[in-house]
């Protein structure tokens, strides 16, 4: 219990112990939310992965630039990688190479597989750049549609499909080209950072394969970063069982223990704003916030019972919480599913476009409704948790 602050104002020691345990639970719930949010994510999309991309980006971009300048020396025979890297900014190539190399290393993927993924990412980027130049209207429309997709791989798949279909003047690529380009970029990643290494692994009887792995130092860094990120994940802020500590400064007040770290009375990310609030003499502001957060509340048992009964009553009562999902209209009967869009008549294309537009609106609406159902469930869970308490309190803060 050395991490808990003493709190002398409230006389009820039993409540104080429960409140300390509750704040520890807030932290545990925050860590569980953090774990769920990162589950299934590519390593490069996590906070530690993004940090490593940021750190390694500049040296890798400089190495790519130096490689291209060296390749352009008169009389020097150019490699396959030069043909494609000449069309992309070094920073963009470095970003894509780092993301897919980190993802490959996280899974111990084969060097050929990771190389192909890096080369394919560069190809996709160049194809999209070409589409933006040759068909800006289509490009903007496609981007607007894929913003609604929640999975990055789904977005990339949609974009690749459109590029293959409409961008006839894109660079031609072979499987070999993609692998050779990716392998060169992975080689540069390995030489400019202490992030990854390629290892020749023995697999099966007289069979070896090169795989991409994190270095020992990088692996340790990732493990420590994950543990630290989980430790400092934003806690779930639940109501309190005792009055919050009075705010005496912008950083001292609210919850009782240090388990919930970093709470500030003035909620702003700007350091200038935090400094201004910290140095401001504002006793009336502190007194007002403290008076509000000392107000006791209690769960209305009757109303909660009605809400729970309504929620369990099925579709008849769903409108009390959220609107019902919108049904998706069937595909137009006059538009065959097995016919390419380019072979459809003008009327059929217009009918298909209108159907897709309506479907996108319905998908987006239903996604919002799902979020509202989750929020409702969380509120009812919280009300149930504090149902038997004589009083609950809410720490209060100020906006920026």
Image: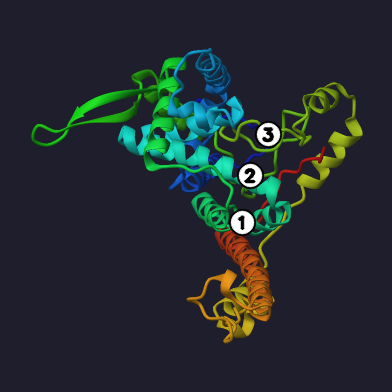
Relative depth, front residue between 210 and 277: 210
Q: CA distance from mark 3 to mark 1?
A: 37 Å
Relative depth, front residue between 57 and 381: 57
Mark closer to the chain start, 2 or 3? 2
Label pair 1/2, CB-CB below 8 angstroms: no
- Position of residue 106 relative to residue 340, above or below, is above
- Mark 3 closeness class: few <14, some 14–19, many ≥20 residues within 10 Å: some
Mark number for residue 243? none
According to the picture, the residue beneath numbered tag 1 turns out to be: 146
Front disc: 2 or 3: 2
- Element type at mark 2: helix
Residue located 58% across and 45% down the image: 127
According to the picture, the residue beneath numbered tag 3 turns out to be: 263
- Element type at mark 1: helix
Relative depth, front residue between 367 and 96: 96
Question: Within the image, what quadrant is residue 319 found in?
Answer: bottom right
Q: Residue 78: image x %, image y %?
A: 46, 22
Label pair 2/3, CB-CB below 8 angstroms: no
Q: From where the camera sits, is residue 231 visible?
A: no
Mark closer to the chain start, 3 or 1? 1
Mark closer to the chain start, 1 or 2? 2
According to the picture, the residue beneath numbered tag 2 turns out to be: 130
Label pair 3/1, CB-CB below 8 angstroms: no
Q: CA distance from mark 2 to mark 3?
A: 48 Å
């Amino acid at each position: 219990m050395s991490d808990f602050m003493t709190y002398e104002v409230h006389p009820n020691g039993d409540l104080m112990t429960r409140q300390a345990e509750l704040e520890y639970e807030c932290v545990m719930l925050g860590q569980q939310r953090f774990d769920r949010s990162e589950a299934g994510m590519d390593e490069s999309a996590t906070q530690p992965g993004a940090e490593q991309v940021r750190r390694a980006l500049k040296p890798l971009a400089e190495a790519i630039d130096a490689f291209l300048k060296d390749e352009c020396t008169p009389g020097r025979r150019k490699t396959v990688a030069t043909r494609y890297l000449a069309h992309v900014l070094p920073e963009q190539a470095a970003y894509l190479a780092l993301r897919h190399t980190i993802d490959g290393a996280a899974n111990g993927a084969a060097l050929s597989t990771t190389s192909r993924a890096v080369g394919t990412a560069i190809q996709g980027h160049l194809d999209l750049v070409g589409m933006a130049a040759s068909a800006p209207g289509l490009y903007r429309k496609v981007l607007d549609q894929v913003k609604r997709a929640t999975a990055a791989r789904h977005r990339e798949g949609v974009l690749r499909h459109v590029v293959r279909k409409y961008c006839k003047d894109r660079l031609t690529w072979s499987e070999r080209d993609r692998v050779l380009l990716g392998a060169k970029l992975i080689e540069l990643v390995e030489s400019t950072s202490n992030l990854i290494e390629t290892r020749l692994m023995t697999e099966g009887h007289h069979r070896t394969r090169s795989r991409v792995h994190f270095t020992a130092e990088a692996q340790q860094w990732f493990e420590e970063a994950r543990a630290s990120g989980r430790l400092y994940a934003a806690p779930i802020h639940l109501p309190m069982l005792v009055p919050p500590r009075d705010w005496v400064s912008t950083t001292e007040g609210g919850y009782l223990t240090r388990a919930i770290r970093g709470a500030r009375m003035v909620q702003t990310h700007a350091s200038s704003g935090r400094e201004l609030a910290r140095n401001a003499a504002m006793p009336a502001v502190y007194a007002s916030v403290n008076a509000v957060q000392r107000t006791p509340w209690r769960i209305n048992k009757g109303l909660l019972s009605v809400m729970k009964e309504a929620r369990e009553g099925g579709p008849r009562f769903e409108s009390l919480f959220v609107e019902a999902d919108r049904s998706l209209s069937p595909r137009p009967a006059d538009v065959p599913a097995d016919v390419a869009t380019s072979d459809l008549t003008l009327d059929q294309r217009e009918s298909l476009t209108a159907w897709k537009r309506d479907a996108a609106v319905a998908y987006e609406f239903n996604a919002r409704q799902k979020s509202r159902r989750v929020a409702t469930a969380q509120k009812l869970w919280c009300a149930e948790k504090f149902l038997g308490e004589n009083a609950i309190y809410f720490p209060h803060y100020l906006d920026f």
